[in-house]
């Protein structure tokens, strides 16, 4: 059974991770990434990878799932940035 702290973590993870979806969708839809900061997303990707490693060490389902999804969305945005300059 998942404890209440992990439930709070899962809700927080869903909210913060879903924040990347509109940017990824808009960039894909408009094929425009001129206003996106590549540096910001590269730094963010580095931090999220470290959060994933930390979550794995803690065996935190919320941290692991959120950071995997965030890595995927961040990589997509970086790819769009490079493709749709």
Image: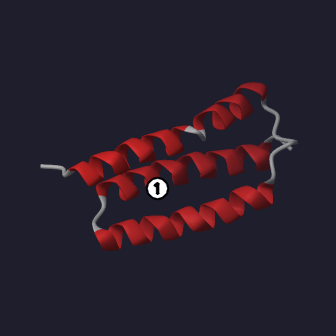
Instruction: Tell me if residue 22 comes above or below residue 2 in the rendering.
Output: above
Q: Quadrant of the C terminus?
A: top right
Q: Looking at the image, which residue is at 34% across and 47% down?
A: 8
Residue 35 located left or right of residue 78: right
Q: Total of numbered circles in the picture?
A: 1
Q: Where is residue 43 in the image (x, y as percent from the top left)?
A: 69, 65
Instruction: Tell me if residue 54 comes above or below residue 11 in the rendering.
Output: below
Instruction: Tell me if residue 65 comes above or below residue 84 in the rendering.
Output: below
Q: Residues within 10 Å of mark 1 (few under 14, many from 20)?
A: many
Residue 45 located left or right of residue 79: left
Q: Where is residue 45 in the image (x, y as percent from the top left)?
A: 61, 61
Q: Position of residue 38 (x, y in %)?
A: 78, 56
Residue 1 located left or right of residue 80: left
Element assignment for label 1: helix
Taking depth in this image into account, of 33 and 9 the one nearest to the observer is 9
Of all residues, the one furthest to the top in this rendering is 29
Q: According to the image, what is the colour scheme of the structure? A: secondary structure
Q: Position of residue 63 (x, y in %)?
A: 39, 57
Taking depth in this image into account, of 59 and 80 the one nearest to the observer is 59
Taking depth in this image into account, of 33 and 63 the one nearest to the observer is 63
Residue 32 located left or right of residue 12: right
Q: Looking at the image, which residue is at 47% across and 48% down?
A: 69
The image quadrant of residue 55 is bottom left
Q: Mark 1 points at which residue?
A: 67
Q: Looking at the image, which residue is at 61% across and 67% down?
A: 46
């Amino acid at each position: 059974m998942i404890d209440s702290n992990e439930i709070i973590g899962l809700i927080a993870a869903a909210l913060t991770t879903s924040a990347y979806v509109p940017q990824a969708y808009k960039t894909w839809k408009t094929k425009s990434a001129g206003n996106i900061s590549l540096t910001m997303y590269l730094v963010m990707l580095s931090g999220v990878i470290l959060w994933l490693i930390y979550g794995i060490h803690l065996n935190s389902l919320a941290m692991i799932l959120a950071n995997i999804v965030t890595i995927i969305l961040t990589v997509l945005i970086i790819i769009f940035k490079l493709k749709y300059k």
